[in-house]
Image: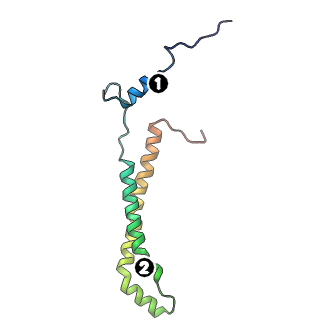
């Protein structure tokens, strides 16, 4: 019975793989994904959420005594509540770009769905 033996020619060298990943030589370097940096998207998202949350905290201080006091409170702080709502809605844009970029990078790197 002929048993195939593994040779060093068909086993990838870990050192050469490491060099090809971090090499400055363009012929050996792997292709990079051409998407936006995820850290930047994360920071923009967190900034919008923080700005929106700090403005919308005023909406939770609405007095529950009477309708007149609540209407007066909203009239006084309405602009701040609208600005907070805008920031909360605007945070969905970098979040959507982050999700699309992450999925694209996973597919670029050869990632598959769990169900496959």
Classify 32 as above or below 37: above
Furthest residue to the right? 1
| Residue 94 numbered mark, or none | none
Residue 21 locus on image (x, y percent)? 39, 30
According to the picture, the residue beneath numbered tag 2 turns out to be 58
Q: Position of residue 51 (x, y in %)?
A: 37, 68
Please give the count of numbered marks on the rendered protein: 2
Of circles 2 and 1, which is in front? 1
Q: CA distance from mark 2 to mark 1?
A: 57 Å
Of 69 and 8, nearer the camera is 8
Check if mark 2's residue and mark 1's residue have beta carbons within 8 Å. no
Q: Residue at x 37, y 56 (%)?
A: 43
Mark 1 Cα-neighbour bin, 10 Å: few <14, some 14–19, many ≥20:
few
Q: Is residue 78 above or below residue 106?
A: below
Circle 1 is placed at which residue position? 14
In the rendered image, residue 59, in percent from the top left (x then y), is placed at 44, 79
Q: Is residue 20 above or below residue 37?
A: above
User: Callout 2: 10 Å neighbours few (<14), some, many (20+)?
Assistant: some
Q: Residue at the spot x=40%, y=72% of the render? A: 54
Q: Does 49 sit left or right of 7 as displayed?
A: left
Indicate whether 60 appears above or below 43.
Answer: below
Of pointers 2 and 1, the one earlier in the residue sequence? 1
Please tell me whether mark 2 sits on a helix, a strand or a loop. loop
* Residue depicted at x 45% and y 51%: 99
């Amino acid at each position: 019975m002929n048993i195939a033996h593994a040779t060093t020619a068909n086993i990838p060298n870990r050192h050469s793989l490491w060099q090809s990943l971090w090499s400055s030589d363009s012929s050996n370097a792997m292709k990079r994904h051409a998407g936006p940096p995820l850290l930047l998207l994360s920071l923009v998202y967190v900034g919008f959420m923080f700005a929106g949350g700090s403005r919308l905290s005023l909406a939770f201080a609405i007095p529950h005594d009477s309708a007149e006091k609540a209407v007066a409170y909203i009239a006084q702080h309405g602009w701040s509540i609208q600005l907070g709502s805008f920031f909360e809605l605007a945070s969905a844009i970098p979040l959507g770009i982050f999700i699309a970029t992450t999925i694209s990078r996973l597919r670029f790197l050869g990632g598959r769905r769990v169900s496959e």
